Amino acid sequence: MVDGKVVLITGGTRGIGFETARVFLENKAKVIIFGSRQETVDKALKEFQEEGYEIDGYAPNLKDFENICEVVSKIYEKYGRIDVLINNAGISANQKIEDTTAEDFQKIMDLNVNAMFYMIKAVVPYMKKQNDGVILNTSSMVSLYGQPSGVGYPASKFAVNGLTKSLARELGKDNIRVNAVAPGITKTDMVASLPKEMIEPLIQTIPLGRIGEPRDIANAFLFLASDMASYITGTILSVDGAARS
Ligand code: NAD
């Protein structure tokens, strides 16, 4: 479905991003992952290389637009195109508002929103030159329903939907599609760090009776990146087992 496509994935060292890299590799894409530290990038690359895949990885500072541009330009020089950008790096929060500092709120916005904007801004000139590209953003179920604590997280994901829908309208004429996937609770380190008392009751309310696997989300990215989704843009695709909390 994505044979030969050059696919750049942020937050590709573990969880949803790691599994997404695997699914694209299985489908013969040329994959480049970004992670927050070179050691974790190297560890992820080694794991894929031991499975026989060719893959590249970098650890640019996602809070530094210049640094992102340097690395993206290096990737473009090496591969000659950038077909798909998957903006997946993100952090969550669950403190009550009284316990959330201005710095906590800023930290979430810096990664979940500003870094996403920087990545898109760095890649769009190449996609425009190609007159072809797909941008996929990781949103969340909380972007539709909010959540009862950690307000910075849902606020950031509402912003992700805003970037997605607006840029889909702005970039359609350049043949660049922009969509988001909104996962429900998914089995990754992000969820492992949340208290069991918060997760268990949520699972009880999911009509499909289980939490998501990273592969459930990765498959949605694969579909949206492929030509099967060639008339889909500006969509927030829920992958959440119909969870509504
Ligand atoms: P994870 O914690 O397992 O992975 C997060 C990824 O983001 C890692 O690869 C990490 O390297 C990267 N990252 C974190 N901080 C970074 C930084 N400062 N700079 C650069 N990269 C950084 O989490 P995950 O569950 O795989 O989450 C991936 C995405 O999915 C996030 O955007 C998250 O909001 C979203 N999401 C997750 C769930 C869930 O239940 N797991 C639900 C909805 C949405």
Image (cartoon, grey):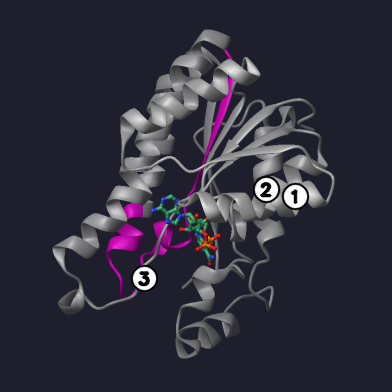
| In front of the other: 212 or 107 | 107
Q: Quadrant of the N terminus?
A: top right
- In the picture of the structure, the residue carrying the numbered disc 3 is 147
Instruction: Please tell me in which quadrant of the rendered image residue 7 appears.
Output: top right
Inspect the image, locate mark 1, and give the three-letter code of the amino acid beneath it.
Phe
Mark 3 crowdedness (10 Å alpha carbons): few <14, some 14-19, many ≥20 = some
- Give the label, 2 or 3, closer to the camera: 2
Name the residue at the bottom extreme: 197
Inspect the image, locate mark 3, and give the three-letter code of the amino acid beneath it.
Gln
Q: Report, in whole angstroms, how far the alpha carbon at label 3 lies from the one at label 1.
A: 35 Å
| Dot 2 and dot 1 residues touching (CB under 8 Å) | yes
Per the rendered image, the range of residues in magenta is 131-156
Of the numbered discs 2 and 3, the one sitting upstream in the chain is: 2
- In the picture of the structure, the residue carrying the numbered disc 1 is 48
Instruction: Please tell me in which quadrant of the rendered image residue 79 appears.
Output: top right
Q: Is residue 218 visible?
A: no
Mark 1 crowdedness (10 Å alpha carbons): few <14, some 14-19, many ≥20 = some
Q: Report, in whole angstroms, how far the alpha carbon at label 2 lies from the one at label 1.
A: 5 Å
Q: Report, in whole angstroms, how far the alpha carbon at label 2 lies from the one at label 3.
A: 35 Å
Q: Is residue 75 visible?
A: yes
Q: Residue 78 location, x and y as percent?
A: 62, 19
Tag 1, which secondary structure? helix
Q: Residue at x 55, y 87 (%)?
A: 200
Q: Residue at x 59, y 54 (%)?
A: 13
Q: Residue 118 location, x and y as percent?
A: 36, 33
Tag 2, which secondary structure? helix
State whether residue 158 is above or below residue 163.
Answer: below
State whether residue 103 is above or below residue 83.
Answer: below
- In the picture of the structure, the residue carrying the numbered disc 2 is 45
| In front of the other: 193 or 61 | 61
